[in-house]
Image (cartoon, grey):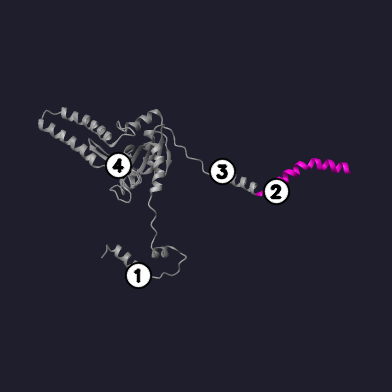
Amino acid sequence: MSKLRSLTFKLLAPAMALSIGFASSPADAGGKKAAKTAAKKAPAAKKVPSLSEVNKKKLLERMAGLKFGMSKDEVLAQITKSLDEAYEEKIKATTDIRTKDRLRAEKKAEVARVKATYVTFEQNKPSPWDVSIIEGEFGHGTEEAVMERWINSNGKNERQFFFFYQGKLWKTFISLDVSIIPEDKRNFETFQSVMQNQYGPALVEPGVLTWQASEFKSRAIDKLKAYDAIGLTLENPSVDKELVALREAKAPPKKEASSIIRAVVDDKNEQIDVKANSGGVDAVIKAQRGGK
């Protein structure tokens, strides 16, 4: 009998030791279980489809000879070159000296207009683009700037924005004209279908389509409701990552609401001392009445 007990103990000893080991480390077991649960819950990263060579070429044509890393003067030189080519045909098409001079003056004025639109986004200083079709495409106090060109001729109506970081071109934003699309069809579904037919499958997110190439990223942005337009960007992805972190670091702190507003929105406060805050109430009323 004693031999049987001894043999049974020997057979069960490894299993008992393993059981004791697990029992003595509940934190480890719980940690592993939590890790597995977190891994299951973590959403898979959304993959941006790669552009085909044909569609990549189509999008690069939108750069019109521009390259990432160009300075403001180099961008202006490229714009001047494209205007020279466009106006040369018009100038050759007429023999009238006055018409030729007028066309040359128009070209010169166009370059001057583009140059005059250059704006830097300084810290704590509003810009004319803070509420516009390109809002959200830049940050303040991050060494960013923008320059604009409006093409409105020969049936073409586009606004081109050239974004600079530390004085170098890193992104273009084109506001595409959608007037050719019937008004009842100007919606996200039509926008999605047209853009993917043009440039291939994209990562589809609310209001945005995204494509990826080795040297650039492109986004098509739904601006139909607010601006009756579609935004198309081509951007340097490495600069984009750098600016996302920089903008977050430079973002101004959120302003704290007044005690009256906090009291109104906080359902834990059952009473509001209006008398003690009568000055704040008057200020709100005056603001709503335009200060009268």
Q: Which residue is mark 3?
A: 39
The answer to which image quadrant residue 87 occupies is top left
Mark positioned earlier in the residue sequence (3 or 1): 3
| Comparing labels 3 and 2, the label whose residue is closer to the camera | 2
Tell me the crowding category of disc 3: few under 14, some 14 to 19, or many 20 or more residues within 10 angstroms, Cα based. Answer: few
Mark positioned earlier in the residue sequence (4 or 3): 3
What's the amino acid at mark 2?
A: Ala
CB within 8 Å, label 3 to label 2 = no
Q: Is residue 28 left or right of residue 166?
A: right
The image's mark for residue 102 is none
* Viewer-side residue, 134 vs 276: 276
| Comparing labels 4 and 3, the label whose residue is closer to the camera | 4
Mark positioned earlier in the residue sequence (2 or 4): 2
Disc 2 secondary structure class: helix
Query: Which secondary structure type mostly characterizes the magenta part of the structure?
Result: helix
Disc 4 secondary structure class: strand
> Marks 3 and 2, Cα distance to the nearest angstrom?
24 Å
Q: Which residue is mark 4?
A: 146
Q: Which residue is mark 1?
A: 278
> Marks 4 and 1, Cα distance to the nearest angstrom?
45 Å
> Marks 4 and 3, Cα distance to the nearest angstrom?
42 Å
What's the amino acid at mark 3?
A: Ala
Q: Which residue is mark 2?
A: 23
Mark positioned earlier in the residue sequence (3 or 2): 2
Residue drawn 31% across the image and 42% down it:
145
What's the amino acid at mark 1?
A: Ser
Tell me the crowding category of disc 1: few under 14, some 14 to 19, or many 20 or more residues within 10 angstroms, Cα based. Answer: few
The answer to which image quadrant residue 148 occupies is top left
Looking at the image, which residue sits at the far left? 97
